[in-house]
Amino acid sequence: MKILLILSNRSFMNSFPTIQLSTKPGVIDLAWGQPDPKLLPVAAMQRATEIALQKYGADTLSYGADAGAGPLLEFLSARIERNENRALNPDQIMVTGGNSDALDQIATHFTEPGDTVLVEAPTYHLAVRILRDHHLDIVPIATDEEGMRVNALQQALAELKRAGKVVKFLYTIPTFHNPTGASLSEGRRRGLVKIAAQEHLLIVEDDVYRELAYDAPALPSLWSLAPDGVVLRMGSFAKSLAPGVRLGWLTGKGEQIQRIATGGLRDSGGGVNHFTAMTIAAFCENGMYDAQLENLRAAYRARRDAMCEAIVRELPTALFVKPGGGFFIWLNFADGTDTQVLRGRAPEHGVDFIHGARFFVEGGGTNSLRVAFSLYSPDELQEAMKRLRKALDA
């Protein structure tokens, strides 16, 4: 009886997945914008945990301050001021549970069901899911190879104003965009923040890929260019360190930040992921973050280059722009290939991806697809492009 109970419990526990990543055997799945587990800093995180517990003691295991762990906020504030030449007051930055948490909290505190928000077309499909959870009216803004078209934004704002609609915010990924990999040109960045200031439009800047620049430093963030109160900028350790830490930060005008930091969620539970935040503070203070960034940049640069070379060789009908950073390459098929049909047959040839229509809220992307180069080695990525060519030939 006792043995049967133990086996039953073990079977019950094994029915629960441990991690989000799930791939089919024999398939190189380029849909996942996730890091290669071999690149995650397991040993360094073990050292950082020991350092945090030794340095901060029981404070590491307590409820955290509403805005987040002080040591981490001090590190982030100093780094942002040094890298972006913009100083932060303590009330202008807070710790988040990553960019998904930040976007959800912004929608919670700055919108009501039925309000209008703007996104790029295409845009990050899972951000759209968060916005739809809040029952918002989502309006797309056209993009090109330089990012969002500012003239299209102006036109949309004018049309919405005539219709009596007030836009609560614009969600944008101007730096190493997901899914396209494009970066908004500096001229457009300045034009965008100017229009937003004139129109009293709040910009929600998803800046998750800023640290993963492979050829040259990333262009200035919208937040660093804009007057105070125009931009809420979301940063995260998910891509630049490890997604499992579920940790990020938000910068913006003091009253905007405090509106979220003093809301019910943090008032009830304190700062999110406090133990992790204290551990990451130790990780960063002891130089491990910069070392991890160098490792990731080198690895991802090699993977990006390998994939781009293979696309040119194996998929001559695919048009793309080599991204300067981030995780993704966006392919457009000039011959009119329907990528949703292609995806239906791709797993038969040992490869998978996300078809382009998933990234549009009002149709589009039928001849496009997104592939991620972060999860697999250069050799595997080149093999994936060979398999994709076979699927196309079929």
Image (tube, rainbow, N blue to C red):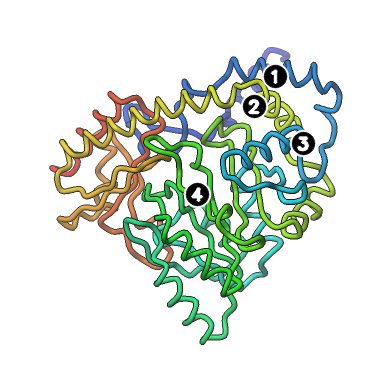
Q: Report the mark closest to the observer, 1 or 2.
A: 2
Q: Report the mark closest to the observer, 4 or 1.
A: 4
Position of residue 161 relative to residue 225, above or below, is: below
Q: Quadrant of the C terminus?
A: top left
**Amino acid marked by disc 2:** Cys
Q: Which mark is residue 284?
A: 2
- In space, the residues marked 4 and 1 are separated at their CA atoms by 59 Å
Identify the mark nearer the N-term, 3 or 1.
1
Numbered disc 1: secondary structure:
helix
**Amino acid marked by disc 1:** Leu
* Occupied quadrant, residue 347: top left
Q: Which residue is mark 4?
A: 220
Identify the mark nearer the N-term, 1 or 2.
1
- In space, the residues marked 4 and 3 are separated at their CA atoms by 26 Å
Towards the viewer: 225 or 209: 225
Q: At x 53% / y 83%, what residue is drawn?
A: 161
Numbered disc 3: secondary structure:
loop
Image coordinates for residue 201, horizontal then vertical, percent: 58, 69
Position of residue 316 relative to residue 257, above or below, is: above
Identify the mark nearer the N-term, 4 or 2.
4
- In space, the residues marked 3 and 1 are separated at their CA atoms by 43 Å
Structural crowding at the residue carrying mark 3, measured as other residues with C-alpha within 10 Å and reported as few (<14), some (14–19) or many (≥20):
many
Q: Which mark is residue 5?
A: 1
**Amino acid marked by disc 3:** Ala
Q: Which mark is residue 69?
A: 3
- In space, the residues marked 1 and 2 are separated at their CA atoms by 45 Å
